[in-house]
Image (spheres, rainbow, N blue to C red):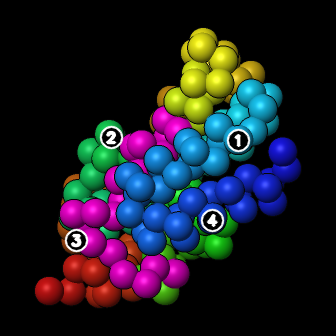
Amino acid sequence: MDETEFWEIVDRAREAAEGDPEEQADLLVERLLRLDPEAVLDFARHFEARYHRAYRWDVWGAAAVLLRGANEDAFDFFRCWLIGQGREVFEGALHDPDGLADLLDDFDEEVDGDGEDLGYAADEAYEQLTGVVTPDLGLPPQAEEPEGVPFGVEDEAALAERFPSLWERFRGD
């Protein structure tokens, strides 16, 4: 499976789910069940590689603005959700996290931003197909610390300063 196929599967599931992350995860499992186990592992590798790429302080800050705070678990689930938004949003967020203000149509922190189930979709499909848990994907482990310069993701003044567009659009209440 190449990168284009990976993103096509993600996009089709998101579009069919009409933006509901839980429904998207269910549809993703259904789509992955149509593939052979090796293709599911390829999908899992693509997903995991992007999940690790998004382990950055600036992405965490953007998540904290959108979610009105983001602990480590919330940030993990946000990264899964971000992948689930498709290539344009994901790559755009990595290029300029504050640019999410222009990339997202809307954001409801009660529904959006939590893609935990998306992170398990490939594992679930692989286990259903083979009856065994997903083997090690052969990828390097996630870094101990997020990439970039650390800052207080709980400091609202710092978030407003670093992410002015996101802050104005989604927190300017």
Magenta highlight on residue 120: yes
Element carrying mark 4: helix
In the visual, does 102 lie left or right of 169?
right
Element carrying mark 2: helix
Disc assigned to residue 34: 1
Q: Is residue 161 visible?
A: no
Residue occupying image coordinates x 28% and y 81%: 170
Decide whether the magenta segment is chiefly helix, strand or loop: loop
Q: Which residue is mark 4?
A: 11
Q: Along the polypeptide, which appears first: circle 3 or circle 4?
A: 4
Considering every residue shown, the one lying at the far top of the view is 132
Residue occupying image coordinates x 55% and y 42%: 29
Q: Which residue is mark 3?
A: 157
Q: Is residue 71 visible?
A: yes
Q: Along the polypeptide, which appears first: circle 1 or circle 2?
A: 1
Three-letter amino acid code at the position of disc 3: Ala
Disc 2 to disc 3, how far (Cα)?
A: 20 Å
Q: Which residue is mark 2?
A: 72
Q: Could you tell me residue 28's position as x and y percent?
A: 56, 49
